[in-house]
Amino acid sequence: MNVTKAEMIITAGMKSQFPEHNMPEIAFAGKSNVGKSSLLNAMLNRRSLARTSSQPGKTQTINFYSVQDTFMFVDLPGYGYAKVSKTERERWGKLIEGYLEKRENLEKIILLIDIRHEVGKNDKMMYDWIKHYHDEVIVVATKMDKIKRSQVQKQLSVIRKGLGLSGNDKLIAFSSETKQGKEELWKVIEECLATESVEVDVQE
Ligand SMILES: Nc1nc2c(ncn2[C@@H]2O[C@H](COP(=O)(O)OP(=O)(O)O)[C@@H](O)[C@H]2O)c(=O)[nH]1
Ligand SMILES: [Mg+2]
């Protein structure tokens, strides 16, 4: 896909702020600092449409980006950041559940895992949760430029085993620095959009 138009629609801190529209949404989930915002920028050919940070745990909002006026990318708040209060964690839980469980527009959730890391408990929980609702899960192994080329296949199989991926799931190695994996990820996203099952009635 050649993205020529991408806009930030809203940074939602609560469910009532989720935008009403009838486009399908592709949401990105993962641990904080996994590289979600960087991946969105790389996919959308933008340097800093989605804000990136070297300090994990900053974004506790759901950010909506419209792409080509035909679908939306949704940046979910990262999980697994220890240094937040119980109140903050509960707020996070409510926000993300409010989106994942009830969002009519949601077409696909893409799970991001750092290619250098073991699969964590939260990653596995998120995978199982997605798998419960979606037959096919798309997993992106991020920051592949941080490991040697010769280690990529090995790390991918660590992730495949750790999550317990099944045959119809997809696992793509990606780098926001080198843009490796970008074409492959677009191809998978375009396939999702082509077989789109979302039908949303927007009340005027
Ligand atoms: N080398 C490298 N660094 C990355 C990559 N993706 C993200 N980062 C860095 O990892 C940190 C967290 O990235 P960010 O996109 O903000 O993560 P988020 O919290 O998941 O949105 C930032 O310092 C990024 O520059 C990548 O593909 N390669
Ligand atoms: Mg982010």
Image (spheres, helix red, strand yellow):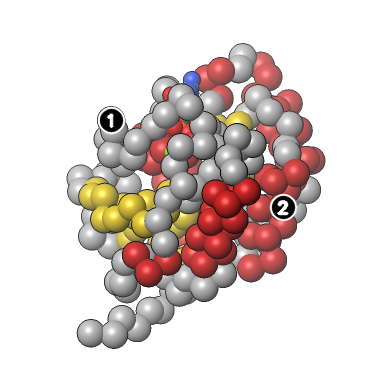
**In the figure, is residue 148 to the left or right of 178?**
right
- Residue 112 spot, x, y in % from top left: 57, 41
Report how far apart the C-alphas of labels 1 and 2 lie in the structure: 31 Å
Residue found at x 73% / y 26%: 154
Relative vertical location of residue 52 with respect to residue 76 in this rendering, above or below:
above
Quadrant occupied by the C terminus: bottom left
* N-term mark: 1 or 2: 1
- Residue 186 spot, x, y in % from top left: 42, 46
Callout 1: 10 Å neighbours few (<14), some, many (20+)? few
Residue found at x 37% / y 69%: 16
Residue found at x 59% / y 43%: 85
**Could you tell me how many numbered marks the image carries?**
2
> Is the residue indicated by label 1 positioned so its CB lies within 8 Å of ligand 1?
no
Q: What element carries label 1?
A: loop
- Residue 133 spot, x, y in % from top left: 64, 68
- Residue 93 spot, x, y in % from top left: 58, 57
Relative vertical location of residue 101 with respect to residue 185 in this rendering, above or below:
below
Quadrant for residue 2, please give it: top left
Residue found at x 44% / y 42%: 59
Relative vertical location of residue 186 with respect to residue 101 in this rendering, above or below:
above
For disc 1, the marked residue is: 47
**In the figure, is residue 157 to the left or right of 200?**
right
Q: Nearer the viewer, residue 199 or 183?
A: 199
Q: What element carries label 2?
A: helix
**Label placed on residue 125:** 2
Q: What residue type is labelled 1?
A: Arg
Furthest-left residue in view?
Answer: 4
Q: Is residue 31 visible?
A: no
Q: Is residue 125 visible?
A: yes
